[in-house]
Image (cartoon, rainbow, N blue to C red):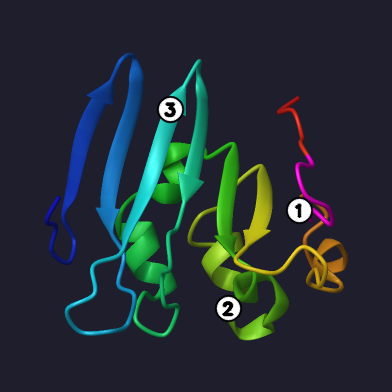
Amino acid sequence: MELKKGERKQIDVEGIDLEALYLSHGVAGLLNLGFVITVDGAKLFHTGDLSPDHVPVSYLQDYGLPEEQIDVAFVPDFLLTMEEYHAHVTEGIQPRYVFPMHYPYEDPPIGVEDDFPNAFVFTDTMENWVLP
């Protein structure tokens, strides 16, 4: 799938609605896509490897992510651990729940729940969580 800045593509996969969004990785020639996934009425958002230095909060807002009413967002851990990137989550996405990703489970990000009470940090393999 090839997308450019500001583009999105909708796909239905056996009743699961996928919407791919172009979100820069920050490296020329390296495609990164984010995905809004709707299944059984729940909306999930996965940022992929977005670079917050190349994807400002306004870019996420231009995609209408706050209005999507995302139930669960999966974001790079540094969006939750580095204060300068918190607005990407709180203003750019506004999810009900948020999960950091791309960290080794044996070295989970510290203090995430202090700044994001709606965050869940897995600290063991095969941990799970059920959307309330």
Q: Marks 2/1: CA distance?
A: 15 Å
Residue 9 magenta: no
Q: Residue at x 50, y 18 (%)?
A: 41
**Horizontal and vertical percent position of residue 117:** 83, 55
Residue 99 horizontal side relative to residue 33, left or right:
right
Q: Which residues are magenta?
A: 120-127
Q: Which residue is mark 1?
A: 119
Circle 2 sits in a helix, a strand or a loop, which is it? helix
Circle 3 sits in a helix, a strand or a loop, which is it? strand
Q: Marks 3/1: CA distance?
A: 20 Å
Q: Residue at x 57, y 52 (%)?
A: 74
Q: Which residue is mark 2?
A: 85
Q: Marks 3/2: CA distance?
A: 26 Å
Q: Residues within 10 Å of mark 3 (few under 14, many from 20)?
A: some
Q: Amino acid at mark 3?
A: Thr
Q: Which residue is mark 3?
A: 38
Mark closer to the chain start, 3 or 2: 3
**Horizontal and vertical percent position of residue 66:** 47, 48
Q: Which mark is residue 14?
A: none
**Horizontal and vertical percent position of residue 76:** 57, 67
Q: How many marks?
A: 3
Residue 89 horizontal side relative to residue 22, left or right:
right
Res 59 → quadrant: bottom left
